[in-house]
Image (cartoon, rainbow, N blue to C red):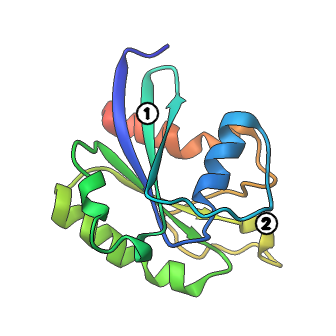
Amino acid sequence: MSSLQKKVLLIGNTGVGKTTFLKKLRTGEFDLKFISTYGVEVHPVDTGKIKFYVWDCAGQERLAVNKTSFYEGTDACIIMFDTQSTESLISIEKHANLIIKSLGLIPIILVCNKNDLIPSYKEIHKEAIYISSKNDTFRELMLPFLKLEKMLLNE
């Protein structure tokens, strides 16, 4: 177990797969059933060097008033978008600006989910890490956290 602990926000529009991503990472199970997160759920993810406490925030558009109350003490952020949702892609800048305005310059990682649903794989955003919560292995799903680990440890 890691002695270093960090808080990470997982944000993005409703339905991009934030909760499904974390469930697959933690349990290996993929669930097609959509159950919307209400408020925030906190899940531990341990890379071996850092134990991340991932705050899985409900779709940002639903929490416009109170969402920044979850941001206090955040060390890094993952913004997730969906290959099937142009709206979620367009919202990246809005989410990033809110994080920067609320927390200053902290590490932010973009994660594109559902890349298995693109008929012919193509890069949508060159800075993003591409995953498929449905098909990817534990190792592949850990990539965003391993990248954050390197950023936070200046490796």
- Secondary structure category for the residue under label 1: strand
Quarter of the image where one finds residue 93: bottom left
* Residue marked by disc 2: 116
**Image position of 98 (left or right of 142):** left
Q: Looking at this view, is 3 or 65 the one in front?
A: 65
**Image position of 17 (left or right of 74):** right
Quarter of the image where one finds residue 65: bottom left
x and y percent of residue 77 in the render?
Answer: 37, 52
**Whether residue 155 is visible:** no
Question: Are dots 1 and 2 in contact, CB under 8 Å?
Answer: no
x and y percent of residue 152 in the render?
Answer: 32, 36
Check the image and report above or below for 6 versus 126.
Answer: above
Q: Looking at this view, is 2 or 37 the one in front?
A: 37
Name the residue rendered at 76%, 72% in the picture. 121
The amino acid at mark 2 is Asp
x and y percent of residue 39 in the render?
Answer: 43, 58
Q: CA distance from mark 1 to mark 2?
A: 26 Å
Camera-near label (1 vs 2) is 1
* Residue marked by disc 1: 52
**Whether residue 25 is visible:** yes
